[in-house]
Image (cartoon, helix red, strand yellow):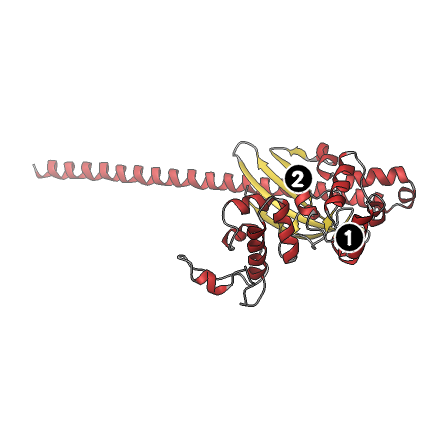
């Protein structure tokens, strides 16, 4: 009888052993599958990232070739070629449309090109420039003034608020208090925290604002609200620039603009011509390329942004950052 009990206990022990071994095997198999999935996702992410980088290189190479062609002596002496290049530089997205998408084995890239000078750099804009931009968006004067002065207060280093602005004391008095930046902002969405810019006004203005660029505005490419921020560019000059653009007539210098204006508009431009020349350009100086790489099958995407600057005989990389679309 005792031998039978011992045999039964042994059998139960063996069965429990088998259950334990099975459980361990299942756990190991599950972990192995998880590791494989993580590894596959990581590989897909790397493919997407490197494909996005390939898109950037393709765009950079095209910009370099276009820049070299623009510097060519024969091209610069030929008015027809010069006019064509001016048109291409001021519509880069369309010019690069045929090369903006491609696939490399199991991953594809797509890039977009934007002239940084088509938006107003909020960190470098004057209070007056910001106000004119808001007014061009049909914002009433008081609201535009509050927003412009509050942005200037948010960015400047002191705690002395402008007449309609806001500084540290104002923000600390809010139900959910915080402190102003007191320095340049790096993410445009931060403007939502500035007095007067929460909600609708931010949504209206954000497409025309940027944290990139050197403060120059491209007269041949910037939209009307951004053009309104150019010193000396009154209503008549704005109309001349925009009408000419619609007819395919682009400007090369301030003289070409001045001769198209009436006496009053010419005098207004002349009075502020030095400020105008510091802000206005007629070709892109800095170009932003946004390249998105997607890994086939897994839906993993990586977005990389790069800003290039035309400098001397090169189109040089100024900065690069990564985000997730």
Q: Quadrant of residue 55?
A: top right
Residue closest to the eye, 306 or 226: 226
40 left or right of 98? left
Does any portion of residue 49 appear in the rendered image?
yes
Q: If the image is split into quadrants, where does the C terminus sit?
A: top right
**Which residue is denoted by mark 1 in the rendering?**
268
- Tell me the residue at 73%/48% (across/down): 234
Q: Residue 233: horizontal and vertical position, in percent?
A: 74, 49
Q: Residue 18: horizontal and vertical position, in percent?
A: 27, 37
Residue closest to the eye, 221 or 15: 221
Instruction: Name the secondary structure under disc 1.
Output: helix
Q: CA distance from mark 1 to mark 2?
A: 37 Å
Q: If the image is split into quadrants, where does the N terminus sit?
A: top left
Q: Quadrant of residue 99?
A: top right
Q: Residue 28: horizontal and vertical position, in percent?
A: 37, 41
**Image disc number at residue 74:** none
Q: Residue 57: horizontal and vertical position, in percent?
A: 70, 43
Residue closest to the eye, 223 or 21: 223
Asked whether the beta carbons under mark 1 and mark 2 sit within 8 Å of each other, the answer is no
The disc, 1 or 2, on the residue closer to the chain's N-terminal end is 2
- Tell me the residue at 42%/40% (across/down): 34
Instruction: Name the secondary structure under disc 2.
Output: strand
Residue ranking furthest to the front:
264
Q: Residues within 10 Å of mark 1 (few under 14, many from 20)?
A: some
Residue closest to the eye, 90 or 112: 90
Q: Residues within 10 Å of mark 2 (few under 14, many from 20)?
A: many
**Which residue is denoted by mark 2 in the rendering?**
112
96 left or right of 53? right
220 left or right of 140? right
Does any portion of residue 311 appear in the rendered image?
no
């Amino acid at each position: 009888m005792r031998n039978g009990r011992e045999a039964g206990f042994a059998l139960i022990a063996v069965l429990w052993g088998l259950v334990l071994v099975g459980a361990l095997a299942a756990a190991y198999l599950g972990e192995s599958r998880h590791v494989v999935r993580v590894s596959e996702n990581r590989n897909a992410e790397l493919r997407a990232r490197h494909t996005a980088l390939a898109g950037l290189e393709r765009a950079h190479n095209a910009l370099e070739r276009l820049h070299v062609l623009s510097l060519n002596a024969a091209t610069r002496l030929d008015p027809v070629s010069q006019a064509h290049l001016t048109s291409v530089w001021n519509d880069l997205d369309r010019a690069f449309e045929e090369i903006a998408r491609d696939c490399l084995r199991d991953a594809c890239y797509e890039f977009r090109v934007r002239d940084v000078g088509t938006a107003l750099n909020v960190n470098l804009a004057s209070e007056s420039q910001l106000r004119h931009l808001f007014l061009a968006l049909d914002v009433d004067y008081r609201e535009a003034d509050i927003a412009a002065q509050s942005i200037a207060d948010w960015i400047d280093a002191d705690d002395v608020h402008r007449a309609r602005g806001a500084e540290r004391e104002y923000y600390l008095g809010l139900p959910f208090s915080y402190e102003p930046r007191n320095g340049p902002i790096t993410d445009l969405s931060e403007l939502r925290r500035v007095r007067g810019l929460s909600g609708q006004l931010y949504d209206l203005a954000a497409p025309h604002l940027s944290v990139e660029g050197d403060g120059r505005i491209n007269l041949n490419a910037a939209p009307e609200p951004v053009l309104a921020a150019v010193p000396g560019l009154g209503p008549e000059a704005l109309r001349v620039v925009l009408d000419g653009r619609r007819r395919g007539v682009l400007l090369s210098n301030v003289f070409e603009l001045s001769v198209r204006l009436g006496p009053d508009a010419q005098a207004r431009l002349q009075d502020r011509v030095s400020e105008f020349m510091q802000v206005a350009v007629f070709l892109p100086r800095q170009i932003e390329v946004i390249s998105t790489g997607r890994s086939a099958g897994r839906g993993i995407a990586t977005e990389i942004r790069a800003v290039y600057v035309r400098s001397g005989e090169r189109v040089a990389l100024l900065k690069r950052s990564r985000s997730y679309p």
